[in-house]
Image: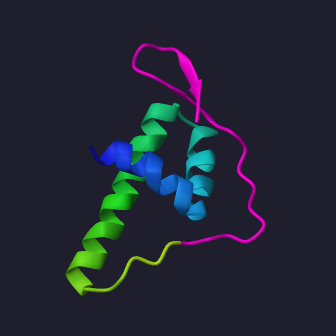
């Protein structure tokens, strides 16, 4: 699913992690990951439409904190 892909993409693209942390400060973590998935879909569409390679944003010296995400069972798990 695209949401699972968003979790993986955040490990590589630090700009997505930064956006996710920004979103989780004002909304539920599950809603935030859906927003990240939508952002990822927009990037995928752009890459396919313009036939350009995906260029991920790597922010130098960015050390993300471990974020907790709630599973569907309501149990917190660290990624």
Residue 34, image x, y percentages: 38, 43
> Is residue 16 among the parts visible in the rendering?
no
- Tell me where the magenta segment starts and ends, as one range: 57-79
Q: Reply yes or no: does residue 39 show up in magenta.
A: no
**Residue drawn at x 25%, y 86% as measured from the top left:** 51
**Residue drawn at x 34%, y 54% as measured from the top left:** 38
Residue 23, image x, y percentages: 56, 45
Q: Nearer the viewer, residue 15 or 12?
A: 12
**Residue drawn at x 60%, y 61% as measured from the top left:** 14
Q: Main secondary structure of the magenta part?
A: loop
Count of picture labels? 0
Residue 55, image x, y percentages: 46, 78
Quadrant the C terminus occupies:
top right
Vertical order, 54 against 5 (above or below)? below
Residue 3, image x, y percentages: 35, 43
Q: Nearer the viewer, residue 50 or 32?
A: 50
In the displayed structure image, the side of residue 2 where residue 28 appears, left or right: right
Vertical order, 72 against 51 (above or below)? above
**Residue drawn at x 57%, y 20% as measured from the top left:** 76
Q: In which quadrant of the rendered view does residue 18 lie? A: bottom right
Q: In which quadrant of the rendered view does residue 46 lie? A: bottom left
Vertical order, 78 against 42 (above or below)? above
Q: Nearer the viewer, residue 32 or 44?
A: 44
Quadrant the N terminus occupies:
top left
> Is residue 78 among the parts visible in the rendering?
yes
Q: How is the image coloured?
A: rainbow
């Amino acid at each position: 699913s695209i949401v699972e892909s968003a979790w993986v993409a955040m490990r590589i693209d630090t700009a997505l992690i930064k956006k996710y942390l920004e979103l989780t400060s004002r909304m539920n973590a599950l809603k935030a990951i859906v927003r990240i998935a939508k952002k990822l879909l927009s990037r995928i569409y752009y890459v396919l439409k313009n036939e350009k390679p995906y260029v991920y944003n790597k922010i130098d010296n960015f050390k993300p904190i471990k974020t907790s995400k709630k599973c569907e069972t309501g149990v917190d798990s660290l990624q």
